[in-house]
Amino acid sequence: MSQNTNLQNTKSFYITTTLPYVNGDPHIGFAMEIIRADVIARYKKALGYDVFFNTGTDEHGLKLYEAARDRGIDIMDFLDEASSKFKDLIGDLNISPDIHFIRTTDAHHIKSSQALWNRVMDRGYIYKKNYQTKYCVGCEENKTDSELEDGKCPTHPNREIEIIDEENYFFKLSALADQLYTLFESNPKIVIPESRLNEMKEFVKRGLEDFSISRLKEKMPWGIDVPGDEKHVMYVWFDALTNYISTLGWPENENEAGENGTELGNFNKYWRDGTPIQYCGKDNTRFQSITWQSMLLAAGLPNTQSIIINGWITGEGGVKMSKSLGNTINPSEVVLEYGADALRFFVTKELQPFEDSPFAINKFKEVYNAHLANGIGNLVSRVMKMAVSYEAKLSNELVESVKSSIGILSGVANKHVEDFRLDLYVQEIFDDFTKLDQFIQEEQPFKKFKVEPEAARKDLIYLQEKLLAGAYRLSIIMPKTSEAVIDCITNHKMPEEPLFLRKE
Ligand SMILES: [Zn+2]
């Protein structure tokens, strides 16, 4: 296969989601984020890359401590239960089984966060000063007066704003503004889409302020100890963001550089050499693009290659999803009713790649029936029924030739996926399926078979070739459906059950 010249077997690749904060059940926005990241991970694996795919749970901060206390249970029992819900969701969504799952309460993560703190401190980017601020525990964020309404956080009007007046450790973000701006200028793909990168450039241009990265332990009892100062714990974001490299075994393996006969450690293999990609929601833009990138700069570590910013999933009419409005969607319930592939299809093809999109279950059902039950599901049944009864079987050579014509299986990058336009990638595959429906309508092989059986068999060979090609391309989006279709065609049989049952 000539395409194989591009195959880069030895190349490594890193991708991560953000770590959801475990103060609530997994929501549909996180399901979208991890499905999209999984598609990229599967795509890179198909291209021959050695992939490290990371996710996990963010488990420090006052909000969690209070929630466990309110329920009268031990904080670790509370966190074990909360974290396991996210692990269950990963299984439900059929995410790559070799995904790494990190918890910020893991012993190694704690050591790693303290090592990053020490590194940043040693390089002169942490100092101590007296400090007064207003803080919303709901957001785990400082608030300026202009961000408050009647002295309350608009997102958390039922919480009292905390007045903090204490000596804190500060991160010298102001000293990194120029370096950060240069980074944004030198890598135009560091934040995708471009509109978000422009927002971040503007933000840096307006000037960056140092911010507090510790709390007094007596006021914030659930955090990682500041090294060398037992009265303080780290700001939850400082610890949480470190997960992206602690998951790789940093810092212990930082010197395993693969030179002079030493083995290449995971940090160097996947972070330094692996062009790291991070997916996140738009509420995370500043934390990932400014805070995390400046922490890496301060520590003298390589930056992220690209941060992909997803829009939010909203309720119908663009209103925010919330429990009180009763418009939240439980991703595991959707999977139970429609299957993981249906949700994987919907969040890649139907939801905007970078902008907000509404998610209503009626619309979901409509799309499911049109494209999956009456679409690919029906198409596979019709084609295989005819193929089996006319004895039109693809030869092994033909199967191999179809497989080797698929770019992503032959080391050829796909432009849409490289641009994180999964919607366009799926659209092309489904447009081809629609053409097969038209082909059946025009050629009518079921009528042809009575008078010209050889011509009808030829039609069925063609239909199966095209269907098989679509199934291979679909493997990164809808792995189970892809496997089922490949199984039917290569084993010359009808699907044992409909791929997608029609929903009334
Ligand atoms: Zn708030």
Image: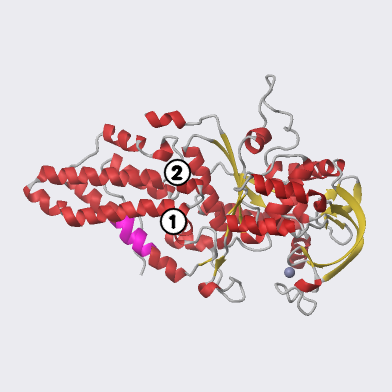
CB under 8 Å between discs 1 and 2: no
Label 1, residues with CA under 10 Å away: few <14, some 14-19, many ≥20: many
Which is nearer the N-term, disc 1 or disc 2?
1
Q: How many marks?
A: 2
Q: Which residue is mark 2?
A: 414
Residue 132, visible in the rendered structure: yes
Secondary element at tag 2: loop
Side (left or right) of 90 relative to 435: right
- Distance Cα–Cα, label 1 vs label 2: 18 Å
Residue named by callout 1: 345
- Residue shown at the point (24%, 47%) measured from the top left: 463
Residue extending farthest bottom: 150
Residue name at image x 43 percent, y 69 percent: 363
Some atom of ligand 1 lies within 8 Å of the CB belonging to the residue at label 2: no
Displayed quadrant of residue 466: top left
Residue type beneath disc 1: Phe
Q: 346 and 89: which one is in front? A: 346
The residues colored magenta run 368-378
Residue type, numbered disc 2 = Asn
Left or right: 4, with 158 as reference point? left
Position of the C terminus, as image quadrant, is bottom left
